[in-house]
Image (cartoon, grey):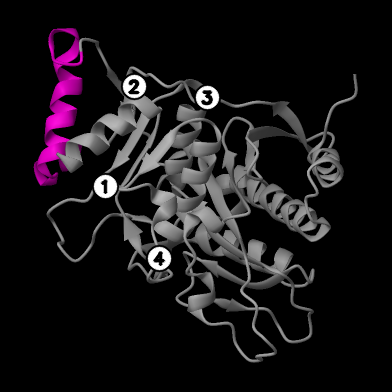
């Protein structure tokens, strides 16, 4: 039986699910960009791409060389194809305008070009997260596309995915009809379908959280994690293992593969910051992927995909993964 490449899968989706051709093209271009980023990441010190720059992104985080390289790869790959009306990235303060010499399309692309890049110098898996939205009708309006065009709840995403650059480079993708996993065949030069129907187990014995922040957590999180740590003699009646990679892509990939719950709660250090992870290009695409795989994703109080964004770089608390545990920690917040 012949192998199903990403291109073949997308063409078959166009035939069977009426996936628009320009969306298919957009996903293929993003996948091509991810292959280029994977190549850069794999060079490491040999390519002179490790280390930090003397600059910060809009969040005040020091930019790694590969953050900027990955951002440029995604912009240059996607700006000319005519399928996008605009782009936005963790590494840019404002929305990116499609140059005037290129046609404008029906979609918006939002991305974190290199998630987990603080780990890049120690050879830990990192990745690219992306979200696709429809561009609002502009009714003949010309000029720059404003930030408000991007401020759509996660339920409006038409596609979401991530690439993970680890021992294998994989692309996990949802078009709103389940989650598929593709592995990069470097000899073929193509992503090949290797994980056809991905499901997150409803129950789990694994959790992921940064325990060094425990003293700053809110009471519901303190309660929940203390119950996890109490093991089989505690109220939950089972032993749990903690896993924490400090790369969201890697942690979520593990959960998609074998279950678990990922938590990045708000904490008391900065009351003006409701969370660490960004809603538009981290929480929303990951929440869509997890939900499409049968899991759940909330901010502790409501479904992440229902949150109405108020700014491009808005932060939120995140609890996602196996449904049983996500619903438990969410109930603790509401009680």
The answer to whether the residue labelled 4 contacts the one labelled 1, judged by CB atoms less than 8 Å apart, is: no
Real-space Cα separation, disc 4 to disc 1, in angstroms: 15 Å
State the mark number for residue 101: none
Rendering coords of residue 105 (x, y %): 74, 72
Quadrant in the picture for the C terminus: top left
- How far apart are the alpha carbons under marks 4 and 3? 29 Å
Tag 1 residue: 301
Q: Earlier in the sequence, mark 4 or mark 3?
A: 3
Residue at image point 37% right, 19% down: 204
Residue 257's disc number = 3
Q: Which residue is mark 4?
A: 309
- Sort mark 1 into few (<14), some (14-19) or many (20+) by Cα contacts within 10 Å: some
40 shown above or below 191: below
Q: How packed is label 4: few (under 14 Cα within 10 Å), some, or many (20 or more)?
A: some
In terms of secondary structure, where does tag 4 sit? loop
Start-end of magenta stretch: 210-236
Q: Which mark is residue 206?
A: 2
Which callout, 1 or 3, points at the residue further toward the start of the chain?
Answer: 3
């Amino acid at each position: 039986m012949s192998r199903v490449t990403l291109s073949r899968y997308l063409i078959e989706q166009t035939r069977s699910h009426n996936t628009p051709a320009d969306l298919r093209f957009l996903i293929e271009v993003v996948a091509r960009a991810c292959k280029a980023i994977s190549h850069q990441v794999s060079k490491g010190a040999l390519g002179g791409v490790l280390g930090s720059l003397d600059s910060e992104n809009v969040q005040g985080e020091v930019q790694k060389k590969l953050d900027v390289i990955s951002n440029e790869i995604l912009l240059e790959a996607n700006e000319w194809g005519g399928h996008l009306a605009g782009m936005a990235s963790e590494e840019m303060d404002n929305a990116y305008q499609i140059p005037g010499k290129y046609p404008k399309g029906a979609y918006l692309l939002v991305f974190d070009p290199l998630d987990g890049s603080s780990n890049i110098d120690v050879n830990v898996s990192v990745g690219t997260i992306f979200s696709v939205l429809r561009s609002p009708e502009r009714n003949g309006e010309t000029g720059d596309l404003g930030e408000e065009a991007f401020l759509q709840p996660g339920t409006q995403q038409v596609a979401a995915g991530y690439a993970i650059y680890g021992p294998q480079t994989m692309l996990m993708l949802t078009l709103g009809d389940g989650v598929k996993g593709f592995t990069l065949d470097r000899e073929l030069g193509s992503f090949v379908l290797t994980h056809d129907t991905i499901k997150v187990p409803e129950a789990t014995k694994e959790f992921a959280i940064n325990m060094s922040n425990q003293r700053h957590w809110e009471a519901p999180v303190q309660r929940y994690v203390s119950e996890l740590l109490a093991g089989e003699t505690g109220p939950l009646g089972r032993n749990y293992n903690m896993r924490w990679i400090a790369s969201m892509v890697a942690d979520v990939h593990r959960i998609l593969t074998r279950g678990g719950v990922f938590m990045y709660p708000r904490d008391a250090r900065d009351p003006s910051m409701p969370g660490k992870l960004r809603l538009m290009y981290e929480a929303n695409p990951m929440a869509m992927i997890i939900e499409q795989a049968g899991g759940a994703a909330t901010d502790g109080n409501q479904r992440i995909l229902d949150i109405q964004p108020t700014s491009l770089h808005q932060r939120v608390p995140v609890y996602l993964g196996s449904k049983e545990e996500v619903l438990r920690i969410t109930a603790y917040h509401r009680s």
